């Protein structure tokens, strides 16, 4: 039963691709509008060197942005927890900041910081920072009071309670936030590249679309999906390594 | 013999929305070295509040608490850190006090082995039974080498059979370590089985209603609860509480 469940997702994907291929080959829709999967795989092979250059650029932006979002998100969450007055003032502003569409800020960032890596990294940070900051901030507060009382009875300082209890207890929430952020990271980098860049999958997709080379847009999209899944897998591995107690035998 | 803990006229008042609620009023009690003392009372009588005041987790509104050293506290829930193995949980007091872990590791392994718990040393709390978790939490309290153990209903989360087994286990632990204990409970038979002295707490606000001595021989077994002295004490406690 478990094996069947594990097989069901790849099977569904293969069935979907087969259906798509057949429909496209039978002339159900023009290849220039919706190319069949075989053409997309062929394009991936033919344009592999060009795609690799653009992929490396996008992944670089996404990974640096995600890393900075982690540092900033966890840092802000800890600061807000340690200074409740700052939290009361800043937390509503943080929520408010999320109502501003990042895509509207992207042109401003390009004007301020140019066409290089930096503005794209900022866009990724803006996309990825919030889920991490909110998840960790809430988790730091929601720690079991019995455990906090235990540490207080040992005359532990607030810093020790944070180190021994609150931070480890927040790891699960941190990884939930990180998983959401990871799905945003590549997309965030591409949004930045759409607005203005020399390299990256966003630029590649835009140029391909302008040239009506739809098959290349799909090839880039396939890479976006693959890289996003790969990053998510890495997060899952990091989570397993960081929270072994969750996977211990019950 | 001088007391290891003396509680004098302790009161606790909570303020909320301009209203004052008195949780404890004029509480007096003491624990002597090696003595096992229980505080028994109905729900809402302020038992846990009293224990938290003694553990210095919350502040008293009036009265004084005098104690030799810092007590070892065990909250109602075992409060084992789920991300630490059993051994690492037992090392927590060391980590908080900044004592090198090597100083305690031998003692921890020895104590785990003495009580047949060594096989759990590298396991996480989630993989342990309820009774074993409570035992580990009790060991953690004992390992702090403090003069007084403060136990807040440590058997409440356990089923009836595990509770009886763990009570006997606690008695053997206390006898081996010569610890003094202040136990909070709402279980009359548990209080009689374990204690040398029982304080009865009444509710609204919590105040000491009676102090009773338990004249049962040690070492004890659950058969002692069927003796005439125990049954009479049970009857008296029941009439005081209900």
Image (tube, rainbow, N blue to C red):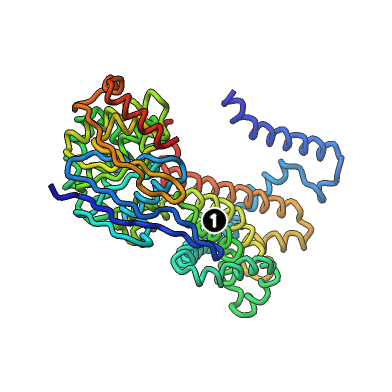
Tell me what residue is drawn at x 68 percent, y 52 percent.
Answer: A221
Q: Who is closer to the viewer here, B125 or B143?
A: B143
Tell me what residue is drawn at x 76 percent, y 38 percent.
Answer: A21
Residue B128 in view of the camera: no
Image position, residue A215 (x, y; %) = 74, 51
Vertical placement of A195 versus B158: above or below? Answer: below
Which of the 4 image quadrants contains residue A126? bottom right
Image position, residue B162 (x, y; %) = 37, 26
Which of the 4 image quadrants contains residue A55? bottom right
Vertical placement of A246 versus A5: above or below? Answer: below
Q: Chain of mark 1?
A: A
In this picture, residue B103 sits left or right of residue A34 = left
- Count residues near mark 1 (Cα–Cα under 10 Å), then give few for <14, some for 14-19, many for 20+: many
> Quick one: which residue is furthest to the bottom in this view?
A112
Image position, residue A238 (x, y; %) = 45, 47
In this picture, residue B59 sits left or right of residue B72 = right
Instruction: Describe the element under mark 1 as helix, strand or loop.
Output: helix
Query: For the image shown, how many numbered marks are present on the structure?
Result: 1
Q: Which residue is mark 1?
A: A135
């Amino acid at each position: 039963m478990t094996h069947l469940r594990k097989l069901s997702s790849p099977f569904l994907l293969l069935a979907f691709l087969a259906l798509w291929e057949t429909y496209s080959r039978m002339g159900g829709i023009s290849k220039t509008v919706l190319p069949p999967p075989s053409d997309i795989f062929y394009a991936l092979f033919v344009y592999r060197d060009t795609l690799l250059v653009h992929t490396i650029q996008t992944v670089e932006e996404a990974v640096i942005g995600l890393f900075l979002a982690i540092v900033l998100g966890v840092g802000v969450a800890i600061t807000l927890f340690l200074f409740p007055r700052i939290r009361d003032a800043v937390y509503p502003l943080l929520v408010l900041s999320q109502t501003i569409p990042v895509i509207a800020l992207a042109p401003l960032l390009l004007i301020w910081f140019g066409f290089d890596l930096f503005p794209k990294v900022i866009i990724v940070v803006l996309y990825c920072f919030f889920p991490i900051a909110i998840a960790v901030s809430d988790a730091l507060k929601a720690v079991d009071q019995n455990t906090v009382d235990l540490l207080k009875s040992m005359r532990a300082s607030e810093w020790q309670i944070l180190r021994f209890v609150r931070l480890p207890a927040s790891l699960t929430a941190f990884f939930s936030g990180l998983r959401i952020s990871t799905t945003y990271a590549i997309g965030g980098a591409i949004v930045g590249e759409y607005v203005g860049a020399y390299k990256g999958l966003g630029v590649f997709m835009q140029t391909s679309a302008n040239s009506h080379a739809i098959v290349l847009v799909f090839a880039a999209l396939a890479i976006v999906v693959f890289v996003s899944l790969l990053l998510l897998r890495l997060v899952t591995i990091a989570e397993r390594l960081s929270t072994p107690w969750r996977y211990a035998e019950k | 013999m001088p007391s290891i803990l003396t509680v004098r006229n302790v009161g606790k008042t909570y303020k909320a929305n301009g209203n004052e609620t008195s949780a404890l009023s004029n509480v007096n009690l003491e624990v002597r070295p090696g003595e096992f003392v229980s505080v028994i009372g109905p729900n809402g009588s302020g038992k846990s509040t009293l224990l938290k005041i003694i553990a210095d987790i919350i502040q008293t509104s009036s009265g004084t608490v005098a104690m030799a050293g810092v007590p070892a506290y065990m909250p109602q829930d075992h409060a084992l850190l789920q991300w630490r193995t059993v051994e690492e949980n037992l090392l927590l007091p060391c980590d908080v006090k900044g004592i090198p872990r090597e100083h305690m590791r031998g003692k921890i392994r020895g104590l785990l082995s003495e009580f047949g718990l060594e096989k759990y040393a590298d396991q996480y709390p989630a993989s342990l039974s309820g009774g074993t978790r409570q035992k580990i939490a009790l060991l953690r309290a004992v390992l702090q080498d403090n003069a007084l153990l403060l136990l807040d209903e440590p058997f409440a989360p356990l089923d009836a059979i595990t509770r009886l087994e763990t009570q006997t286990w606690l008695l053997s632990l206390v006898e081996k370590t010569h610890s003094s204990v202040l136990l909070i409970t709402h279980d009359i038979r548990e209080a009689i089985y374990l204690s040398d002295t029982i304080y009865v707490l009444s509710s609204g606000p919590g105040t000491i209603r009676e102090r009773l001595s338990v004249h049962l021989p040690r070492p004890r077994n659950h058969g002692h609860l069927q003796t005439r002295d125990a049954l009479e004490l049970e009857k008296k406690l029941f009439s005081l509480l209900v």
